[in-house]
Amino acid sequence: MQDVTIRVIAHIKSDFPTKFGIPRQSGLVDSLRATIIFEPEFRNPDTLRGIEGYSHLWLIWQFSEAVRKDWSPTVRPPRLGGNTRMGVFATRSPFRPNSLGLSSVKLLGVEQTAEYGSVLHVGGADLMDGTPIFDIKPYIPYGDSHPEATGGFTDTAGEFLLDVDFPESLLSLLPEDKREAVIGVLSHDPRPSYQKDSDRVYGLSFAGFDIRFTVTEDRLQVQEVSRL
C-alpha cells in the first residue's frame, strides 16, 4: 500500500474541549461558532483571496482522537443503537482507514489579526477544539447540492431531537452569545444511543462550562452549570 504525506494547514478553535456532545454532523447547530487558525506557513493573505465570495466551505480534517493502525470493514453507527453493523464506507464513522473527516460550514467572515494573520470565522462546525485541518475548499451550490439525494439510515435523524428544559437561572450563567448554541447541541441528544438511563447525570463541557443534565424519554433537563 502506498503512503502519502498530508500537511496540516490549520487548526480549529471551537467550544468543544472533548468529543462528547459534538453534533454528529456539521450544520445541525447553525449557531455554533468556531475559528480556523492557519499554520504560520499558510498565513499568506493571498491564500484566501476571493474566499469571501462563498457562503459555505468544505473542511477536510482529521479525526485526531480516533487515529489507529488497524481498521474494520464494518462499524456500529450510534444512530442505530450501537448494535447494527454497517460498511465503514456507508457511514461517517471516525474509525476509518485514514481517519479523515469532511464538514460543510458556513463562512461568517475573514479577520486579519496581529497574532495569527488572517483567520476564518465559521458557523455550524462539528469539530473538537484543536482539530487539525488538511484542506479547505469552497462549497459550490450547482455541483455540491443535491436536493433529491437520499440519506440511508440517517434520514431518521430528526426523530432523535429532544425538548430541552434549561432553567433561566442556569442559562444566564453562560455568555449570551453561547446560549442558543448550547441549547441546539443538547437538543440533538449528546448521549450514546445505547445509554437510556433516566437516573444518570451526564456532563457536557462547552465554552468553558460544565453542564450537567438528565434525560427522561424525549425531554432533557439541565441540572447544574459551573465553570471548568
Image (spheres, rainbow, N blue to C red):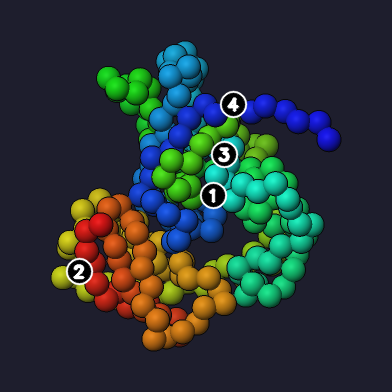
Instruction: Name the residue beneath numbered marker 4.
Output: 7
Q: Tag 3: residue type? A: Trp
Q: Residue at x 65, y 37 (%)?
A: 142
> Looking at the image, is mark 2 or mark 3 earlier in the sequence?
3
Residue 45: give its label.
none
Residue 170: give its label.
2
Q: Secondary structure at mark 3?
A: strand
Q: Measured along the vertical axis of the image, is residue 156 above or below residue 216?
A: above
Q: Are marks 1 and 2 in contact (CB under 8 Å)?
A: no
Q: Residue at x 42, y 34 (%)?
A: 36
Mark-to-mark CA distance, 4 and 3: 11 Å
> Looking at the image, is mark 1 or mark 4 earlier in the sequence?
4
Which of pointers 3 and 1 indicates the residue nearer the eye? 1
Would you identify the image quadrant in which residue 203 lies?
bottom left
Would you identify the image quadrant in which residue 141 lies?
top right
Residue 126 lies, in percent from the top left, at 48, 50
Q: Residue at x 43, y 40 (%)?
A: 130
Instruction: Name the residue beneath numbered marker 1.
Output: 65
Q: Residue at x 65, y 65 (%)?
A: 77
Q: Could you classify mark 4 by the number of other residues whose Cα lies within 10 Å: few (under 14), some (14-19), or many (20 or more)?
A: few
Residue 61: give its label.
3
Q: Can residue 147 be seen in the rendering of this structure?
A: no
Which of pointers 2 and 4 indicates the residue nearer the eye? 4
> Looking at the image, is mark 2 or mark 4 earlier in the sequence?
4
Mark-to-mark CA distance, 2 and 3: 34 Å
